[in-house]
Image: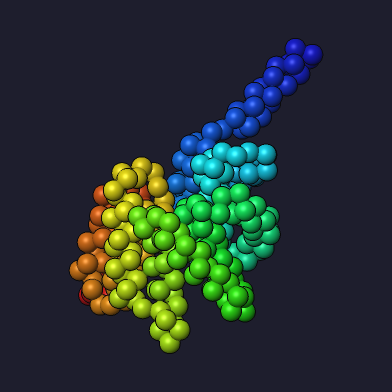
Amino acid sequence: MKKLFFTLSLLISFQLLNAQTETLSQLEEKAYHAYLNSNMALWKMLAPKADKFLDLPSDNQEELIRAIKLKYGLLYACLASKEKDEATFNEYIGKTSDQMSTLIKLFPNSPELLSVSAAIMSIQMAFSPAKAIILSTKSGKQISKALEIDSTCALAWRQDASSKYFTPKMWGGDVELAVKEYEKTVRLFEARNPAKEWMYLDAMAWLGIAYTQLGLNDKAKGIYEKALLVEPDFWWVKRRLLLGLSKSSD
């Protein structure tokens, strides 16, 4: 009995150690699959693991930005779910916002960090439109600063395109300009040979949606098919967007 207990204890300890020593690359691989399959449960499992990197004293800018992008992915999944997952959003937005504020103070001139910060604010506005008066201006300034620092930052262009797509025309929105910026986003991602990058796939999906908005269904079909060449298991494009496009063309 003691031997069995000792063996089980060793096994549990080994599993815990394994969980604790997951690298950021391993977490990013799981995030990629969470996005592909709209797997909220997996996103939730990744959040506390990302916190392990974010809550420890560190000046490793690259690691911290990669970790906060995992938290952003969870919030984005809340917004992208069939019905907005407000409960999960409310559970994680407070700590994630605090972590982001700390990172912005540490690295105020990081284009990627500024872009992710603006993206998180856009999700906050989607859940709480009343906050748009304050957050839209702040978000816009962060995107402008990111592009001023690095005009080739794919994340900044992705967020700027999203802002132009979702903002009403009377308040400065412009779908045609959003298309151009989504196209640029895709090119910039491709220039760095993205591997297992869910935001690259997401940019292609939204480019297709924006094409459809303008009646450019052939272009939409082309970008959807390109996305599936990159990732054949891209459920959103394969089972929703491409099929929906086919039905609207019948």
Q: Position of residue 148 (x, y in %)?
A: 41, 61
Could you tell me which residue is drawn at 31 percent across and 53 percent down? Answer: 188
- Which quarter of the image is occupied by the C terminus? bottom left
Q: Position of residue 21 (x, y in %)?
A: 60, 30
- Asked whether residue 83 appears in the rendered view, the answer is no
Q: Is residue 47 visible?
A: yes
Vertical position of residue 36 compared to residue 118: above or below? above
Most foreground residue, 212 or 23:
23
Q: Which residue is pictured at 26% across the width and 66% down the height?
A: 220
In the depicted view, which residue is nearer to us: 185 or 246? 185
Q: Is residue 108 left or right of residue 220?
A: right
Residue 216 location, x and y as percent?
A: 23, 73
**Of 192 and 225, which appears nearest the observer?**
192
> Residue farthest to the bottom?
170
Give me the residue at 61% from left, 32% from top. Answer: 19
Quarter the N terminus occupies? top right
Instruction: Give residue 167's quadrant in the image.
Output: bottom left
At x 56%, y 33%, the residue is: 22
